Amino acid sequence: MSIEIKTIGVIGAGQMGSGIAHVCSLAGLDVRLHDVSEERINTGLATITGNMARQVAKEAITDSARQAALSRIQPAVTYDDLGACDLVIEAATENEEVKRKIFTNLCPSLRPDAMIATNTSSISITRLAASTDRPERFIGIHFMNPVPVMQLVELIRGIATEDPTYESAKEFIGKLGKTVTVAEDFPAFIVNRILLPMINEAIYTLYEGVGSVDAIDTAMRLGANHPMGPLQLADFIGLDTCLSIMQVLHEGLADSKYRPCPLLVKYVEAGWLGRKAKRGFYDYR
Ligand code: CAA
């Protein structure tokens, strides 16, 4: 039996977590938003408020829908505050150790029948599921950035994921008005298996001096009709996330074609992580 998801917990109030909370609250779900500090939760809430105001200004939603949605989002300072959730989605940083630690600490606070999902963009669902007490009720639900705009959600079963979990997750994504694509549990699934090597190649193109940042992005925007150039998109995703995904591909598929570009590694080492750090391939200061 699939369970109906009415109350959802979101762990991580960064760009993905706040986007997930945003679309869930607009879809009429009660949302509990958690992060490591109240300050981070408040930053996430401010992002949601700003993005919803933008939607009202563009007449994508009404002001009363915005107000109702915002009133459905409550901060969850501790994991115990997620105790009433039917589903908790983890959208923390793309680091396996961090995610495993979250699951270990989270599980005792949840109802036994609650589902857990991860928004990981690349890490094995089966491996993450094994760090919970409920691998049969664990699944990958991978949203795209920016969540309120992007239509697609990837759904990934781990080896132990049971049918009711899969059906509930599918129903939940439908409720958000998004389209599901199913991917098998291979490194980086479908979107990032294809997208990230393209971005990595764009960075190699810069590294080897084939073109400037502007030339590379203009080439792909106007020559391949991409909404953003690959370097602009890398900054938007976050260069640390791009590097983590390339490392997962490189290690998981053991093929040198996935070797992260040394320039990407250097930028991450410098703390030039893209838009969120105000510096990446572009300067946002
Ligand atoms: N919240 C709500 N609405 C938003 C928004 C947000 N965070 N960001 C943009 N929008 C809305 C705007 O209000 C605007 O609405 P209208 O169509 O009603 O006017 C619309 O989206 C377009 O935005 P803009 O006019 O500001 O700018 P744009 O036309 O340049 O589009 C973009 C911005 C949608 C981000 C577009 O550049 C784009 O699609 N870029 C590519 C994004 C992409 O590839 N995402 C996938 C990343 S990979 C990933 O997510 C997987 C992973 O795991 C790493």
Image (cartoon, helix red, strand yellow):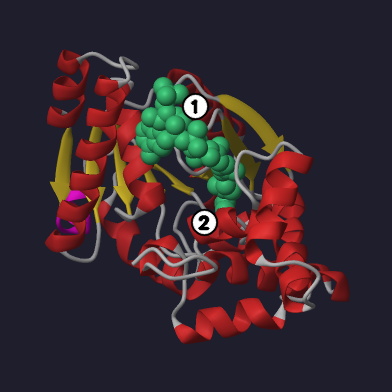
Instruction: Find residue 173 and name its label.
Output: 1
Say which residue appears at 73% left-offset and 63% top-offset: 202
Mark 1 Cα-neighbour bin, 10 Å: few <14, some 14–19, many ≥20 = some
The one nearer the camera, 163 or 89, is 89
Where does residue 86 sit, x and y in percent of width and height? 33, 35
Q: Is residue 2 left or right of residue 158?
A: left
Where does residue 211 sit, x and y in percent of width and height? 75, 67
Magenta stretch? Answer: 77-82
208 shown above or below 223: below
Whether residues under marks 2 and 1 lie with C-beta atoms below 8 angstroms apart, the answer is no
Residue 79 lies in magenta, yes or no? yes
Say which residue appears at 20% left-offset and 54% top-offset: 43
Mark 1: amino acid: Ile
Where does residue 242 sit, x and y in percent of width and height? 59, 65
Name the N-terminal-most of marks 2 and 1. Answer: 1
Residue receiving disc 2: 237
Mark 2: amino acid: Ile
Where does residue 232 sit, x and y in percent of width and height? 56, 55
Dominant SS type (magenta)? helix
The one nearer the camera, 112 or 32, is 32
Q: Is residue 166 left or right of residue 261?
A: left
Q: State the image quarter where residue 85 is shown.
A: top left
